[in-house]
Amino acid sequence: MTNNDTTTLVLGATGKTGRRVADRLKAMGRDVRAGSRPDFDWEDSTTWAPIVRDVHAVYITYYPDLAFPGALDRIRQFTALAVQAGVRRLVLLSGRNEELAQQAEQVVLNSGVEATIVRCSWFMQNFSEGWLLDPVLSGTIALPAGEVTEPFVDVEDIADVATAALTEDGHAGKVYELTGPRLLSFAEAAADISAASGREVAYVPVTPEEFAEGARAAGLPEDEIVGLNALFAEVLDGRNESLADGVRQALGRPARDFTQYAKDAADAWRA
């Protein structure tokens, strides 16, 4: 392996954004190195150096979220290691209005190499590919979100922006804040899903304690339950009830709408 301008490490290469970014890079003829377990593990720093060797650019995604305990320290350690190894371009997937995520952004932006932040609102695909798929299939989305609205963003848009930042000049130092084109409540999102799939889906607001109880019953690990509840309390309090124009800034086109996403994803809800 050689360090050249087509070798890109994609962390979380089997995740929602990572696999899409990897597919786009491969379609462009770029060399892609997949950073996924067991070859790469955020919990095991001994896996980091081998996978970052001889890489020009890195797409950094942190699982489960940059707001979780320990994430900031690991981002600091990995970023320093990557720069020392000769990486020249970093693109970080970040969360909107998350204090710890914004601290991680500064680590990457101040790394001394070309760096871009892709700061995102709630993923649309959480309903069709992620941990909310089973609740959708059951007919009830129960979350401690009250009546808050969210500018859900399409993962396809995220992947397009990340790929552009990894492969094109002109994105260094930019913070692209990505949202969809409109605000929706979770009840409105459920209604769009119902209309697209023909399956009756309802949103039910619950307390954090009720959410935790349901998550335990579904087999979610306790540390993830605690982290998710803390994240919900932080970002589903109304602070994200606004739109941003990062998709247009990065790509020169509008962001994709939730209704179109629901139509395209409908097969996932017809199982």
Image: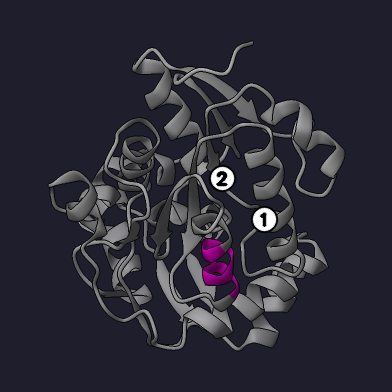
From this view, report whether residue 228 is shown above or below residue 248. Answer: below
Q: Which residue is mark 2?
A: 60
Left or right position of 146 against 219: left
Viewer-proximal residue among 60 and 89: 89
Q: SS class of the residue under badge 1?
A: helix
From this view, report whether residue 227 is shown above or below residue 23. Answer: below
Residue 65 visible in the snapshot: yes
Question: Which stretch did the figure color magenta?
Answer: 100-106
Dividing the picture into quarters, in which one does residue 189 lie? bottom left
Viewer-proximal residue among 175 and 219: 175
From this view, report whether residue 33 is shown above or below residue 102. Answer: above
Q: Which residue is mark 1?
A: 75
Task: Classify 10 Å Cα crowding around label 1: few (below 14), some (14-19), many (20 and above).
Answer: many
Which residue sits at x=47%, y=27%? 22
Pick the quarter of the image with the N terminus.
top right
Left or right position of 93 against 61: left
